[in-house]
Image (tube, rainbow, N blue to C red):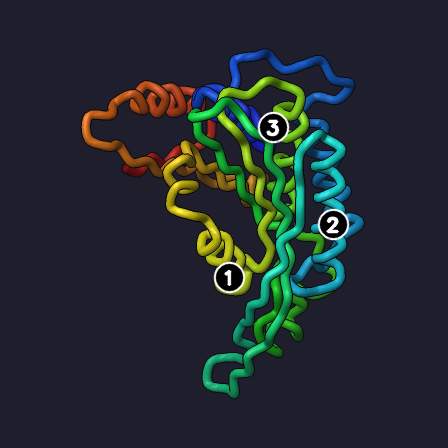
Amino acid sequence: MRYPACLRIALWLFVSAGLTQAAQAASPLSPERYAQEQTRAIATYFPGRMAGSPTELLAAEHLQQQFRALGYQSYLRAFNTRYRYGAPGERVDWQRITASSTIAAKAGLAGQGEILVIAHLDTYLPRNDRDLNHNLGGLTLQGVDDNAAGIGIMLALARDLGRLPLRSGVRFVALSAVTPDLAGSQDYLDRVSPPEKQQTRLVVDLQQLIACEKLRVDYQLLAGANALLPQINALRAQARRASIPLLIHQ
């Protein structure tokens, strides 16, 4: 299982991005163990976290409480969306739902930008009767790899970063309604102002980390800005040591 290696890569990303230079504080639980316990809790106590369901709202509220206990300002963001229900060639109905995402943030130094960490909290939402008949999604799906593990690692990062002085701010976004057509992602992007986008130094997307088929890095170099290249090369070496396939795309 490459789950602990993925967490080490994620922690290294924050250090290499200049978020903090401080060492991790001592803790009764290692980051890996803490992430595993949080993953198990999400999957066990909140199965069937389908967007718009009561369990999804309970999971979002649970994450809000967790973030606040870790010292973050946290709030829920509800939004209305819809998804298509029906198999190809059959009648398609639009199902309307109200989903809830959880957002938590901690400020850094002025002018040092912000790092965004995202993971979706919802589980697969059946899209037609065939899905239901084949038990795809639904009320019993624990969604460990898709995506309780991503939430577990998010909370582990929040725990360790919450007690450190930060140069760059950090924002954790546990999105809902990602499974039906990325509606939650689009809703979040639509609410981010152009100045906020410009202040975002790094985006870390945590999903399917147990399978961990690939670690993908997409980056853009502005004209004359080569400071990012050493970090990209160092990340490539770190992934090689952890035996994680790395895909880098400019």
Distance from label 2 to label 1 (Cα)?
A: 20 Å
Amino acid type, mark 3: Pro
What is the quadrant of residue 162 in the picture? top right
Residue under the point 71% across and 13% down: 26
Q: Quadrant of the N terminus?
A: top right
What percent of the width, then of the height, locates residue 52? Answer: 66, 65
Q: Nearer the viewer, mark 3 or mark 1?
A: 1
Residue under the point 77% across and 42% down: 41
Earlier residue among tags 2 and 1: 2
Residue under the point 71% across and 59% down: 48
Q: Residues within 10 Å of mark 3 (few under 14, many from 20)?
A: some
Determine which residue is flagged by label 2: 61
Q: Quadrant of the C terminus?
A: top left
Determine which residue is flagged by label 1: 183
The count of marks equals 3
Of residues 211 and 228, the one drawn nearer to the viewer in this rendering: 228
Residue 153 — which label?
A: none
Amino acid type, mark 2: Glu
Q: What kind of element bears circle 3?
A: helix
Q: Residues within 10 Å of mark 2 (few under 14, many from 20)?
A: some
Distance from label 2 to label 3 (Cα)?
A: 26 Å
Q: Is residue 146 visible?
A: no
Earlier residue among tags 3 and 1: 3
Q: What kind of element bears circle 1?
A: helix
Amino acid type, mark 1: Ala
Q: Residue furthest front?
A: 110
Q: Residue furthest bottom?
A: 91
Determine which residue is flagged by label 3: 4
What percent of the width, then of the height, locates residue 63? Answer: 71, 44
